[in-house]
Amino acid sequence: MREEYESICRKYYNRIYLFLLKMCANTELAEDLTQETFYQAILSLHRYNGSSDMFTFIAAIAKHTYLKHLRKNKQRISDISLSELAEILSDKGAADPAYLCERAGEEFSMRNAIEKLDGKYRDVVFYRIYADMSFSQIAEALDITENSAKVIFCRAKKKLKEELQHEINV
């Protein structure tokens, strides 16, 4: 059992860490959440029936671990500090402070808009954008059809666009 756990960790650790880092925009928090995710995954491994990809199973646990962290700390997705976002964006090679502030503002607005999405819309966006999951993986994770995942994502993008346009015009 220990070898199986270590194999799972080696195979999925980096991908889950990056998934959580995209969501929380904090390297230390992403590391802690990744550790907690794998701890919860090991506790829940007996419930994994093989009907979905192992990554899909662990990504669902990671998403719930992150949302639980936000609730516990009375935070929202949009409560990410702009300095943390600027630090992450600077790692992408941007050195211009004005550019970083603009990008941080865009990122903050996007996170706020995603937070306002309802249930499955938010879930599909989380999995698609933050975990780079395919529509078939999203369908497995949410127990919907692949076509439904595509339609929900399309509708979510439309809602996000409307929300962001509304925010710009306010």
Image (cartoon, rainbow, N blue to C red):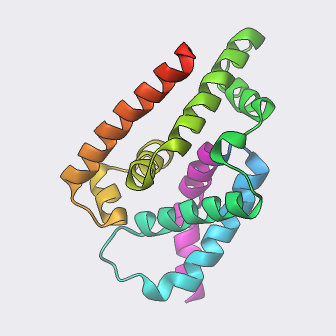
Q: Residue at x 72, y 42 (%)?
A: 79
Q: Work out whether 101 lies above or below 79.
A: above
Picture coordinates of residue 162 (x, y %)? 41, 26
Magenta-colored stretch includes residue 8: yes
Query: Vertically, is 51 above or below 146?
Result: below
Q: Residue at x 68, y 27 (%)?
A: 89
Which secondary structure type mostly characterizes the magenta part of the structure? helix
How many numbered circles does the render carry? Answer: 0
For this view, does 59 lie left or right of residue 39? left
For the point 30% across and 46% down, the residue is 152
In the displayed structure, would residue 97 be above or below residue 24?
A: above
Q: Residue 114 in magenta? A: no
**For this view, does 54 lie left or right of residue 37?**
left
Residue 106 placement, left or right of 131: right
Q: With respect to residue 54, does 105 lie above or below? A: above
> Quarter holding the C terminus?
top right
Question: Residue 25 lies in what quarter of the image?
Answer: top right
Of the pair 106 and 54, the residue shown nearer to us: 106
Residue 154 appears left or right of 68: left
Residue 156, x across and y down, in percent: 37, 39
Percent of width and height locating residue 6: 59, 76
Q: Nearer the viewer, residue 59 or 105?
A: 105
Would you identify the image quadrant in which residue 47 lies? Answer: bottom left
Q: Residue furthest front?
A: 170
Region of the chain picked out in magenta, as a range: 1-23
Residue 160 location, x and y as percent?
44, 32
Quarter of the image where the N terminus is located: bottom right
